[in-house]
Image (tube, rainbow, N blue to C red):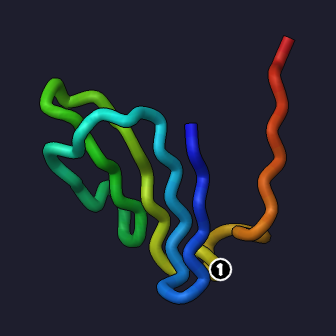
């Protein structure tokens, strides 16, 4: 998994897989889901991230359990 924040365009991207994106769909305003050829979600893009995420430059990672 890879998480990037592009400050210039204010987009936060979360990529779950290296699979080629076949289709993208704006599920909710400002939230784009990327799908592979089998319909699996391979990434999420959050547009205008600085207005939607508390701190798009900071990532906290934890394993539950």
Residue lying at 31% horizontally and 55% vertically, measured from the top left:
27
Residue 14 position (above or below residue 1): below
Residue 47 position (above or below residue 28): below
Please tell me in which quadrant of the rendered image residue 62 appears: top right
Residue 3: image x %, image y %?
A: 60, 52
Residue 12 position (above or below residue 62): below
Residue lying at 65% horizontally and 80% vertically, measured from the top left:
50
In this rendering, position of residue 25 left or right of residue 50:
left
Residue 59 position (above or below residue 42): below
In this rendering, position of residue 65 left or right of residue 9:
right
Considering every residue shown, the one lying at the far top of the view is 65
Residue lying at 37% horizontally and 70% vertically, measured from the top left:
29
Q: Quadrant of the N terminus?
A: top right
Q: Quadrant of the C terminus?
A: top right
In this rendering, position of residue 26 left or right of residue 30:
left
Mark 1: secondary structure: helix
Q: Residues within 10 Å of mark 1 (few under 14, many from 20)?
A: some
Task: Provide the residue designation for mark 1.
Answer: 50
In this rendering, position of residue 61 left or right of residue 12:
right
Please tell me in which quadrant of the rendered image residue 17 appears: top left
Residue 47: image x %, image y %?
A: 46, 74
Please tell me in which quadrant of the rendered image residue 6 appears: bottom right
Give whichever of 27, 59 is nearer the camera: 59
Tally the marks: 1
Residue lying at 60% horizontally and 83% vertically, measured from the top left:
7
Residue 40: image x %, image y %?
A: 28, 28
């Amino acid at each position: 998994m890879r998480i990037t924040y592009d400050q210039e365009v204010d987009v936060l991207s979360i990529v779950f897989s290296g699979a080629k994106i076949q289709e993208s769909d704006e599920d909710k305003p400002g939230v784009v889901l990327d799908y592979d050829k089998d319909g699996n979600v391979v990434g999420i893009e959050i547009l205008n991230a600085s207005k939607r995420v508390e701190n798009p430059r900071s990532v906290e990672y934890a394993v539950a359990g």
